Image (cartoon, rainbow, N blue to C red):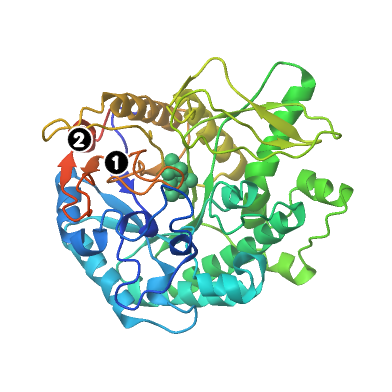
């Protein structure tokens, strides 16, 4: 069995544009739905974040020092097409500078084309992802990325966590705020899936040597008890949360359970015959997944009401809330697991189970594009002693190694996040990075970077290619 990780294993780390770049209105950039949300709660502010836009050279130097083989970044749609339609050369130049710097430092870029940040003007014009009109705009943007950056980028992700954006509209993306109806949820699913299919096919045509795949948020799902109803609920949760978009993209067919769920509720969202035809022969090269925690499923009778979980915004344990989909499942807490301060359940073995489940069903190489622990970090002098993060990552990497020994093909691992970024739910109080970004000065100008203990620890893992 594996002593070390495969020689070409991609040890990476991840970020996303709106969470790290800042400079949200610089050099012709348009306003994205994330920028439009600024000030909507006490945390959300994309204007400066880590100011990676101006400090990318310093940051890439740190990536080099860390030993990264690969770096996952996203391209801000609004830098390339500020109004959704007209190209902005300065935005393209910015990513050219970043990509050149990465290549110079021998770091392979993995690019997420869409990470929660489409132009606000497309939202205003036709409702963003609610409308099939966005597909052409998205494909145009993706084509430009392939044409401009395809000489240096050989790994691509289409849409980040389509399944979570759709299932938890209140949690992620924000642009679905106020829209809870099942109809819209599945409409967005279909629009995003068609967009995925077109962009994957386009990439294969334009860049035959590149690899591209979808990216889902994934969890191991446990039945709450060994009652058969709970086991069924666990299977339902898997189909509902993960398999629906992946079955379309990988098998070219609609998941039967979800299709039935829609029909039985009279939810009139359909993929036309033509669209279903488009789902044939998509052939993603891999499946990427983001894993933070596992989940529990319990039987949920039809007469219950649908419920969305509320964010634990306070970062104090004990605020768990769960979603409920009548007739399918309701979530519950797991008494056997520890939790982060934001009540995310910590489950390294669930990580191994996730690998096995995904690989058994889709038989495609897997990439982990996010995994990590959000925590309060304290800067002490020039140091951050984040042993809790090391513990989390170490246990997960060990289970990833076990999964490889179980026979799963795993090609890459990108912890979230390379540096401290704007958390989608908790601003800068919740940190994930290997590099601490000091935002303590009042006007957020200095933004000094400090290497955390986890930085040195991960550096050793990469050098040894082993845990
Ligand atoms: C994922 C997103 C990331 C990241 C992460 C952590 O869903 O793809 O962008 O933010 O979750 O979430 P949070 O910042 O809410 O802790």
Question: Which one is nearer the viewer's eye here, 112 or 184?
Answer: 184
Label 1: state its secondary structure. loop
Asked if residue 48 lies left or right of residue 403, the reply is left
Residue 232, above or below 123: above
Question: What residue appears at the point 23 percent right and 53 percent down from the top-left corner?
Answer: 444
Label 2: state its secondary structure. loop
Asked if residue 234 lies left or right of residue 395, the reply is right
Residue 359, above or below 287: above
Question: Which one is nearer the viewer's eye here, 1 or 258?
Answer: 258
Question: Which one is nearer the viewer's eye here, 2 or 123?
Answer: 123
Residue 452's tag is 2
Furthest-left residue in view?
A: 381
Asked if residue 80 lies left or right of residue 323, the reply is left
Question: What residue is disc 1 on?
Answer: 433
The answer to whether mark 2 and mark 1 are in CB contact below 8 A is yes
Residue 391 x %, y %:
32, 23
- Quadrant position of the C terminus in the picture: top left
Question: Which one is nearer the viewer's eye here, 12 or 125?
Answer: 125
- Within 10 Å of the Cα at label 1, are there few (<14), some (14-19), or many (20+) other Cα atoms? many
Residue 334 x %, y %:
58, 20
Q: Quadrant of ligand 1?
A: top left
Specify the quadrant of the image occupied by residue 108. Answer: bottom left
Asked if residue 130 lies left or right of residue 369, the reply is right
Residue 387 x %, y %:
26, 24
């Amino acid at each position: 069995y594996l002593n070390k990780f495969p020689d070409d294993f991609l040890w990476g780390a991840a970020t996303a544009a709106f969470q790290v770049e800042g400079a949200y209105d610089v050099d012709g950039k348009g306003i994205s739905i994330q920028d439009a949300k600024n000030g909507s709660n006490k945390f959300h502010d994309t204007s400066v974040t880590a100011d990676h836009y101006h400090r990318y050279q310093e940051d890439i130097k740190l990536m080099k020092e860390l030993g990264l083989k690969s770096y996952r970044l996203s391209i801000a749609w609004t830098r390339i097409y500020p109004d959704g339609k007209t190209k902005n050369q300065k935005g393209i130049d910015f990513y050219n500078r970043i990509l050149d710097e990465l290549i110079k430092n021998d770091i392979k870029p993995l690019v997420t084309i869409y990470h929660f940040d489409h132009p606000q003007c497309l939202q205003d014009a036709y409702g963003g992802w609610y409308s099939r009109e966005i597909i052409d705009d998205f494909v145009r943007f993706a084509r430009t990325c392939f044409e401009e950056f395809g000489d240096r980028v050989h790994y691509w992700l289409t849409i980040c966590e389509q399944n979570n954006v759709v299932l938890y509209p209140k949690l992620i993306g924000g642009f679905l705020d106020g829209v809870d109806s099942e109809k819209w949820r599945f409409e967005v699913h279909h629009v995003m899936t068609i967009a995925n299919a077109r962009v994957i096919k386009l990439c294969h045509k334009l860049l035959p040597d590149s690899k591209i795949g979808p990216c889902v948020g994934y969890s191991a799902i446990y039945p709450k008890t060994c009652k058969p109803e709970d086991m069924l609920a666990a299977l339902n949760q898997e189909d509902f949360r993960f398999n629906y978009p992946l079955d379309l993209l990988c098998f070219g067919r609609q998941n039967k359970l979800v299709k039935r769920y829609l029909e039985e509720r009279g939810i009139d969202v359909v993929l036309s015959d033509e669209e279903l035809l488009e789902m044939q022969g998509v052939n993603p090269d891999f499946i990427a997944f983001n894993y933070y925690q596992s989940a529990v499923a319990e039987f949920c009778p039809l007469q219950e009401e649908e419920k969305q979980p509320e964010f634990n915004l306070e970062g104090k344990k004990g605020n768990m809330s769960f979603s409920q989909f009548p007739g399918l499942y309701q979530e519950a807490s797991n008494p056997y697991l520890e939790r982060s301060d934001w009540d995310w359940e910590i489950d390294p073995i669930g990580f191994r189970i996730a690998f096995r489940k995904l690989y058994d069903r889709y038989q495609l190489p897997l990439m982990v594009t996010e995994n990590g622990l959000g925590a309060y970090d304290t800067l002490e002098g020039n140091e951050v002693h984040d042993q809790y993060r090391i513990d989390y990552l170490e246990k997960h990497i060990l289970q990833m190694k076990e999964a490889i020994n179980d026979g799963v093909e795993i090609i890459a691992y990108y912890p979230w996040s390379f540096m401290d970024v704007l958390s989608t739910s908790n601003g800068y109080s919740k940190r994930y990075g290997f590099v601490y970004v000091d935002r303590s000065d009042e006007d957020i100008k200095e933004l000094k970077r400090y290497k955390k203990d986890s930085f040195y620890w991960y550096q050793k893992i990469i050098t040894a290619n082993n845990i």
